[in-house]
Image: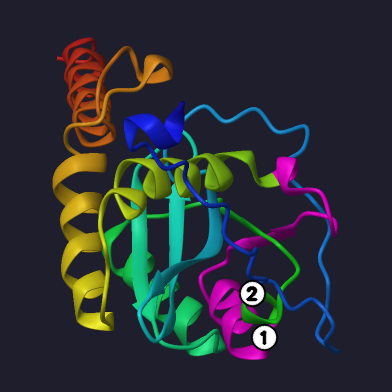
C-alpha cells in the first residue's frame, strides 16, 4: 500500500557513539538523583549529539538549565574533541550568574578531561556524572536532544558544516528558547519563563524593602 501511494518510511540510521568513557580521568558520583531543583542555575545538564551531513557528521554539544529548560550553551564541532564541550561551558559561564551550581553529564572524556573539570572547580561548581548505560539519569538533556532532532534536524537536509552552523543557532535562540511551549513551565517558552522569575523576584525584593521603610 505504501508503494502504491508513493510513501517511503523513514530509514533508521546507524547509531553513532558520542561517549568515550574509557579514559584515565576521575569519575564523579551522581549528585542530582535525589535533588529537588527550586530555581535556575542550580543544575545544568550537558550532552553531545551528532548531525549527519553529506561528508560525515557534525557534533553538537549543549548545556541546559533543567529548571527553566533553557539552553545556556551550545556549539557545533567537526570532531568530538574536549575543546568542543569546553567552548560550550565557557559560553554558559559567560552568560549566566551562578552560585551553588551542579554540572551533570555522562562519564565521557570530553566532560572528565582535566581542562573541563578544572574550569568547573575554578567557578566552585559541583561535578556530577551518571553511570554508564543509564541515559535516564540525564533525562533533561536527552529530551532536549530528541526535540532538536525531531523538530529541526530531521526536517532539513544538511549538506555541509556551514548548514548546521547556520540553522542550529536559529532553532535554539529563536524557536526553542523563545517560542516552544512547555507544560512544566505553565505553557511558556524557557526565555519567557525566566523573565517571569526575574520579575517575581524583583517584586518580592521591593515588598521586603517596603517593610523596613
Pick whichever, 145 or 210, lies toward us: 145
Q: Helix, strand or loop at disc 2? A: helix
Quarter of image, res 166: bottom left
Which residue: 65% across, 27% down?
Answer: 36
Pick whichever, 52 or 9, lies toward us: 9
- Residue 179 is marked as none
Q: How many labels does the image show?
A: 2
Quarter of image, res 185: top left
Residue 68 visible: no
Quadrant of the image containing the C terminus: top left
Pick whichever, 140 or 147, lies toward us: 147
- Give how far apart the Cα atoms at labels 1 and 2 are: 6 Å
Residue 26 visible: yes
- Residue 111 is marked as 2
Pick whichever, 151 or 140, lies toward us: 151
Q: Position of residue 199 (x, y in %)?
A: 17, 24
Which residue: 48% across, 49% down?
Answer: 145
Q: Residues within 10 Å of mark 1 (few under 14, many from 20)?
A: some
Which residue: 35% across, 80% down?
Answer: 54
Q: How crowded is mark 2: few (under 14 residues within 10 Å), some or many (20 or more)?
A: many
Q: Helix, strand or loop at disc 1? A: loop
Check if mark 1's residue and mark 2's residue have beta carbons within 8 Å.
yes
Q: Position of residue 116 (x, y in %)?
A: 58, 81
Q: Pointer 1: what residue?
A: 113
Magenta stretch containing residue 194, yes or no?
A: no
Q: Position of residue 202 (x, y in %)?
A: 19, 26
The answer to whether 191 is drawn above or below residue 107 in the figure is: above
- The magenta stretch spans which residues? 113-137
The answer to whether 186 is drawn above or below residue 1 in the figure is: above
Which residue: 49% across, 39% down?
Answer: 66
Left or right of residue 30: residue 168: left
Q: Position of residue 148 (x, y in %)?
A: 38, 48
Amino acid at each position: 500500500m505504501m508503494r502504491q501511494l508513493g510513501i517511503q518510511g523513514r530509514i533508521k540510521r546507524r547509531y553513532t557513539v558520542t561517549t568515550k568513557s574509557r579514559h584515565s580521568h576521575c569519575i564523579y558520583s551522581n549528585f542530582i538523583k535525589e535533588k529537588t531543583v527550586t530555581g535556575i542555575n542550580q543544575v545544568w545538564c550537558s550532552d553531545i549529539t551528532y548531525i549527519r551531513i553529506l561528508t560525515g557528521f557534525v557534533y553538537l554539544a549543549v548545556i541546559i538549565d533543567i529548571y527553566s529548560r533553557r539552553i545556556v550553551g551550545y556549539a557545533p564541532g567537526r570532531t568530538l574533541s574536549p575543546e568542543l564541550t569546553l567552548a560550550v561551558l565557557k559560553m554558559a559561564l559567560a552568560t549566566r550568574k551562578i552560585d551553588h551550581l551542579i554540572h551533570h553529564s555522562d562519564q565521557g572524556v570530553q566532560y572528565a578531561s582535566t581542562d573541563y573539570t578544572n574550569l568547573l572547580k575554578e567557578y566552585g561548581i559541583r561535578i556530577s556524572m551518571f553511570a554508564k548505560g543509564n541515559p535516564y539519569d540525564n533525562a533533561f538533556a536527552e529530551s532536549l536532544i530528541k526535540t532538536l532532532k525531531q523538530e529541526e534536524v530531521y526536517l532539513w537536509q544538511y549538506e555541509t558544516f556551514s548548514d548546521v552552523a547556520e540553522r542550529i543557532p536559529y532553532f535554539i535562540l529563536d524557536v526553542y528558547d523563545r517560542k516552544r511551549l512547555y507544560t512544566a513551565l505553565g505553557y511558556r517558552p524557557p526565555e519567557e519563563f525566566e523573565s517571569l522569575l526575574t520579575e517575581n523576584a524583583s517584586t518580592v525584593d521591593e515588598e521586603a524593602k517596603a517593610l523596613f521603610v
